[in-house]
């Protein structure tokens, strides 16, 4: 059987009194029943706590809390995972195709990893690497040209195949813009 504290009964009985009077009546009733400022009473009542409206308070577990994303390196780019992957694949394809594109700074930093990986695959030149590159880059002919040009173009370089140059902020929303290009 659910026992309703006297404070809640007062709250339900006095619906016509203004909010200030209700608050004073509620605190007076709580103090009269022996509750302290933190809502803990001296009784051994273990049922769910009742809030001011009389409903059972939602018990939040640790998983319900929104925590800060400390040490999470992946940039979410404000998109769900499938859209984010499609965006990164499209940007990777365009950087390799054109050699230089203009995009936002956060997107450029996110796509830099994938462009460098595709060039590493092109330098390797194995069938497995070619199939991995075909699974990421949208254009089949672009993959073939990458695997032909990458070994001699980047033979003396072991990483850092892209360069990110900051430009002026975008006019409409003042987003940080940059140019990402192949070195």
Image (tube, rainbow, N blue to C red):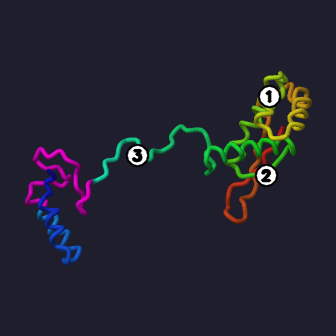
Q: Which x, y percent locates residue 80?
A: 61, 48
Q: Position of residue 167 (x, y in %)?
A: 76, 54
Residue 48 belongs to magenta span? yes
Answer above or below: position of 24 versus 34.
below
Under circle 2, the secondary element is strand
Which mark is nearer the camera, 1 or 2? 1
Local SS, label 1: helix
- Name, please, the residue furthest toward the front: 1
- The residue beneath circle 1 is 131
In the picture, the quarter occupied by the C terminus is top right
In the image, what residue occupies the spot 31% across and 51% down? 58
Checking the image for residue 64, the label placed there is 3
Relative to residue 163, is residue 97 drawn left or right? right
State the mark number for residue 19: none
Assess disc 1: are there few (<14), some (14-19) or many (≥20) residues with their C-alpha within 10 Å of its C-alpha.
Answer: few
Circle nearer the N terminus (1, 2): 2
Task: Out of 82 and 98, give the one closest to the viewer.
Answer: 82
**Magenta: main secondary structure:** loop
Relative placement, left or right, of 138 versus 29 is: right
Nearer to us in this view, 44 or 164: 44
Q: Earlier in the sequence, mark 1 or mark 3?
A: 3
Q: Position of residue 151 (x, y in %)?
A: 88, 26
Left or right of 97, for residue 117: left
Helix, strand or loop under label 3:
helix
Residues under labels 3 and 2: Cα distance?
39 Å
The foreground one among 152 and 45 is: 45
Q: Which residue in the protein does label 2 denote?
A: 102
- Marks 1 and 3, Cα distance to the nearest angstrom? 41 Å
- Magenta part of the chain: 30-56
């Amino acid at each position: 059987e659910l026992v309703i504290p006297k404070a809640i009964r007062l709250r339900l009985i006095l619906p016509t009194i203004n909010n200030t009077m209700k608050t004073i009546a509620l605190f007076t009733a709580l103090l009269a029943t022996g509750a302290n400022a933190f809502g803990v009473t001296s009784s051994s009542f273990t049922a769910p706590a009742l809030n001011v409206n009389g409903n059972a308070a939602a018990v939040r577990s640790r998983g319900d809390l929104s925590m800060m994303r400390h040490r999470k390196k992946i940039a979410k780019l404000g998109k769900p995972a499938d859209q984010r992957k499609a965006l990164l694949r499209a940007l990777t394809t365009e950087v390799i195709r054109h050699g230089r594109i203009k995009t936002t700074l956060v997107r450029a930093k996110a796509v830099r990893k994938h462009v460098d990986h595709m060039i590493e695959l092109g330098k390797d030149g194995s069938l497995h690497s070619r199939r991995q590159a075909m699974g990421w880059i949208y254009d089949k002919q672009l993959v073939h040209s990458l695997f032909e040009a990458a070994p001699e173009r980047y033979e003396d370089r072991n990483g850092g195949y892209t360069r990110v140059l900051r430009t002026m902020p975008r006019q409409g929303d003042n987003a940080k813009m940059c140019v990402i290009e192949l070195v």
